[in-house]
Image: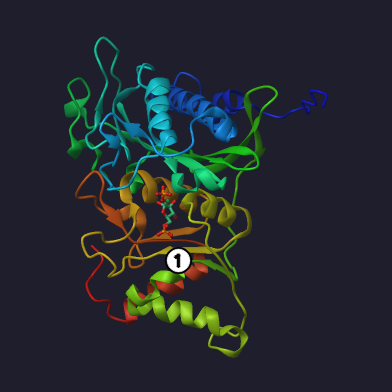
Amino acid sequence: MPLNIQAHQQTLPQFLSTLEPAGTRDWGDISAIVMNASRACKAISLGIAYGALGGVTGDYQAEAGQSINVQGETQKKLDVLSNNMFIHCTESGGQLAGMASEELTLPHQIPAPLKRGRFLLLFDPLDGSSNIDINTSVGTIFSILRCPESHVDGDVSEADFLQEGHAQVGAGYAIYGPSTMLVLALGQDVNGFTLDPRMGEFVLTHPSMRIATETQEFAINASNSRFWEAPISRYVDECLAGKSGARGKDFNMRWIGSLVAETHRILMRGGVFIYPRDTKDLSKPGRLRLLYETNPIGLVVEWAGGRASTGEMPMLQATAKSLHQRIGFVFGSRSEVERIERYHATISAAEPFL
Ligand code: AFP
């Protein structure tokens, strides 16, 4: 296939250079973090593309055997490789004071003699990794925060990361699907880039992405229905009742089991995603992790005109009590998310979310 670089297509570095006046100290650091993260995503994409041929599918075998991470989940080889790749590509840039990863119990300190910076990077290096062996789309999710001034030079603490989602200066995800894409929430806008495998460049293909306000498609893991609280049960029952029910229209349902894939579908054609707080395991108030899953995805959704919620309140106002805290998550087309929030306001849930 000829190298058909179309005229005026912006690569990621060209796009970043146009976003803010050059020389803005913060912006220079933020765009450098994004470039370094994008390099990690390219490497992860390549590792995934080899599949079984690359010898990186299957469970990670530590010396003591199977490895269980802080989440209580069996680590895949690619979980560990993606985590190490993300750290390797970003820690030496000089912009970061520290990092937090789904795969690491404690924050990652920037090792001497590397220069430390003023930002924090939080990430889920390979979300949906239980789908790797079945060749379904997976992704990387990341969030950028400012480091509290008190810790810019010393080691970071868990408390430095416990910031509300609206404090993020940027966020994004990579989706490793039929094509690899990078979707970035920067400067109050959301832009999508497709990896050109011939050039190894991310090219702007989806400028200013917007989520449709209305939808007839919902995503939920229906096998958990007996654990749902009343507002969620009401919403789903009405969707299932279709034209003959209160909603007066039929709905379609999807569930991929990969947050990034669900997010991308909703960005592209609307929809609502629901992984609510439920009574399945009261020690886990939801499945998804607040700081490096629901906050960055929430920023992408909100800046694309959708709504991100705990079910009761805006996601970006939720307060994290611990690094790996889980939370209920409802996001997507604004009118449906607001309906679910109204149901929570009118039907008393078992306990308040937060
Ligand atoms: P894994 O990373 O363990 O595959 O979990 C993926 C995930 O965190 C998120 O991407 C999915 O939306 C959600 O779990 C699926 O959860 P269920 O397996 O309970 O449906």
**In the rendered view of the protein, which quadrant contains the N terminus?**
top right
Percent position of residue 291, x then y: 32, 45
Q: Nearer the viewer, residue 136 or 302?
A: 136
For residue 65, which quarter of the picture? top left
**In the rendered view of the protein, which quadrant contains the C terminus?**
bottom left
Question: Most extreme residue toward the top, as rendered?
Answer: 113
Percent position of residue 219, x then y: 51, 65
Percent position of residue 330, x then y: 42, 63
List the residue tagged with mark 1.
221
Question: Most extreme residue toward the right, as rendered?
Answer: 2
The residue located at (65%, 42%) in the rendering is 178
> Can see residue 333?
no
Percent position of residue 145, x then y: 33, 36
Tell whether circle 1 marks a residue whose Cβ is less than 8 angstroms from ligand 1: yes
Which residue type does callout 1 highlight? Answer: Asn
The residue located at (24%, 50%) in the rendering is 320
> Can see residue 143?
yes
